[in-house]
Image (cartoon, rainbow, N blue to C red):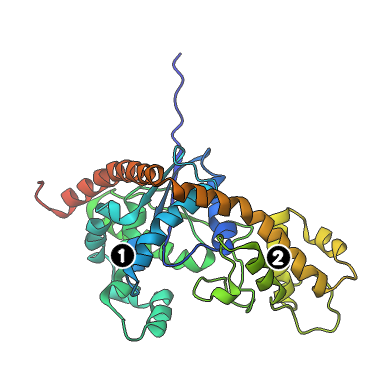
Amino acid sequence: MEETKVQKKVMLSGIQPSGDLHIGNYLGAIKNWAERAEQYDCYYFMADMHTITVRQDPAALRRRTPTQLAQYIACGLDPQKNTLFIQSHVPEHAQLGWVLNCYTMFGELSRMTQFKDKSQKNADNINGGLFTYPALMAADILLYQPDYVPVGEDQKQHCELTRDVAIRFNNLYGETFKVPEPFIPKVGARVMMLNDPEKKMSKSDPNGCVFLMEKPDDIQRKFKRAVTDCDTEHCVRYDAKAKPGVSNLMDIYSAVTGKTYAEIEREFDGLGYGAFKPAVGEAVADYLRPIREETERILADKAYLQSVYKDGAERAGAIARKTLRKVYKKVGFVER
């Protein structure tokens, strides 16, 4: 009797190449992506089309995009097991994005918190793309008919909008899109800023952020300056509300060493913050060293990197074209 091949569930995600990847990106998302390749059919892309909603230096964007791809691979995303591609290399993203613009309501877009945040930060460039990019994000997702979209808590709103748009379209035209579920990692999902542990780590503030390609000395310097807490006891104890600074450092130390909070508390019992912060810095530097070195090796092999993103675009494009043809037929466009 012939064995039936079990079809894997599909998972998709992407990160904008608007700045260098940091340890929050890795611990909160990319590390988990790499571990899912055996269980899921995974698509991961460099979201360069989203990046230009904010003005970019073209040369820097052109450099950062393949660098991010190299980092993905160095972080364990095997191009043979995952479809890795650059968003702008698959034109169906923009084509479906326009269609979904016409099925996304103005009120829905105006409620998006990221539009409000970015409008405040870029008051001189509140462009149409900044307002309608959630429709493009919906297209990014729905093109590949994924079952799950790995998102942080702050991205749940986008996933919910994508689901609403998919359901609206399906109700109008019949079953077209699979309605995806958000997949939120339970551990390491939110790494906070070193200089402000109340805020999620962001590349927009390099002083509070640890980048994957940073040198060990720079990493150590940042951890030595990391904000701890204004208390008198100076003990290393996990309490996210009362001691957010130390708790953030414990989260990071736990993630890179595998030690539990109880083990960390015992290790630094009686030693205080002066011993703890450099230890976290050293552990992070050691943890990131192989990623940095492997990224540098991959970047030196331009032919290999080009082959990865060309192959990825072909594989992604084959799936994207199939979905787009179905959508174009449903809305009444004449077949080419």
Residue 265's disc number: none
Q: Is residue 63 visible from the viewing direction of this image?
A: yes
> For the residue marked with disc 1, what is the amino acid?
Ala
Q: Amino acid at mark 2?
A: Gly
Q: Is residue 314 left or right of residue 214?
A: left
| Residue pictured at 56% horizontal, 64% vertical | 211
* Labelled disc at residue 135: 1
In the picture, residue 13 is in which quadrant?
Answer: bottom left
The residue tagged 2 is 281
Position above or below: 128 against 23: below
Q: Residue 141, percent across and down?
A: 37, 54
Which of these two is toward me, 232 or 271? 271
**Residue 234 percent coordinates (x, y):** 83, 78
Residue 170 seen by the camera: no
Q: Nearer the viewer, residue 224 or 189?
A: 224
Determine whether 254 is above or below 200 in the image: above
Q: Earlier in the sequence, mark 1 or mark 2?
A: 1
Residue 249's spot in the image, x, y percent?
71, 68
CA distance for labels 1 and 2: 40 Å
Residue at left offset 55%, top offset 48%: 294
